[in-house]
Image (cartoon, grey):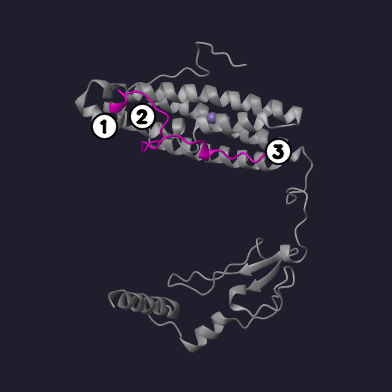
Amino acid sequence: MYHHIKKLMYTVRVDTPDPRFGNMLLEQFGGANGELAAAMQYSVQGLNCDDAERKDMLMDIGTEELSHLEIVGTLARMHLKPMKTARKAAEADPLIAIAGGGGVALCNSMGDAWTADYLKITGELDVDLRSNIAAEARAKIVYERLINFCDDPGTKDALQFLMTREITHMKAFTAALESMGKDRFAIGKIPPTPELVDQYFNDSTGANDEGDADARGPWNEGGDWEYGQAPAFQDLKSEKRGTRTTDSLTTLADAIGEANPVKSGRSPAGAAKHDETKHAKGKKEN
Ligand code: MN
Ligand code: MN
């Protein structure tokens, strides 16, 4: 059951109200990475969770997020309140001032309504925990950006508290995931296709004017990695999954490159597309 206590989890103080900043704060009230989204995501995951210990954690953190929502809502309201009476402040956001009377609404900073589409709930505990770790990372960076754009010491103080708690949650979700003892890449029950799973496809090829070229690193070399050139340009030896070979380095890309060396940054593919458009236009006119 839920119970409300007339006391904020963290006391907020606003030294100088700033309606425009109050508007930015709404991103953490009714935005995609905001507190309502966090509260609903963890609480609903908790309802679906058959693991009693981790369910307890999901309900603990989901409930704390509701307390964060209350803090952000209170803080945003303090910043937005001048919109109710002062014309100059109202101009910062007519929607909030005229339709909302200078109050908070479950919208993001652009006035888009909160939606359950923000939530990531799969019903697979380890997959959900990964989503939660990512959600906390997003919430953290949003708070950091808000702090960087904030001049008000009292507001900064509350945002520092909220930002810190997101890292706390990230630590808890990470520890909960690790304690499940699953292999890092074992998701669900059906194993991935051997060999295919270790093939890295170099699907973005060539070099641009800034000198950016194909990069190699632990994401595509060493360990079990097999580095293969763009399969889109290869003759596939078999359509059966797992039998694609990567030994052919003569790609269509190389062939195109040799036939039409790029001179002015305009690729042959781009030129073809242009002609196609022209052709299509001509057709339409007839
Ligand atoms: Mn939070
Ligand atoms: Mn959190």
- Residue extending farthest to the left is 87
**CA separation, marks 1 and 2?**
13 Å
Residue type, label 3? Leu
Residue 125, disc: 3
Residues shaded magenta:
99-125
What label sits on residue 203 in the rendered view?
none
Q: Which residue is disc 1 drawn over? A: 94
User: Which mark is in front, 1 or 2?
Assistant: 1
Q: Is residue 230 visible?
A: no
Residue at image coords 27%, 21%: 84
Q: Is residue 186 left or right of residue 47?
A: right
Give the farthest residue toward the top.
Answer: 6
**Which one is in front, 273 or 141?**
273
Q: Is residue 285 above or below residue 17?
A: below
Q: Secondary structure at mark 2?
A: helix
Q: Could you say where residue 12 lies in the image, as x and y percent from the top left?
A: 44, 19
Q: What type of secondary structure mainly makes up the magenta span?
A: loop
From the viewer's perspective, is the residue at label 2 or at label 3 nearer?
Answer: 3
Whether 113 is among the magenta residues is yes
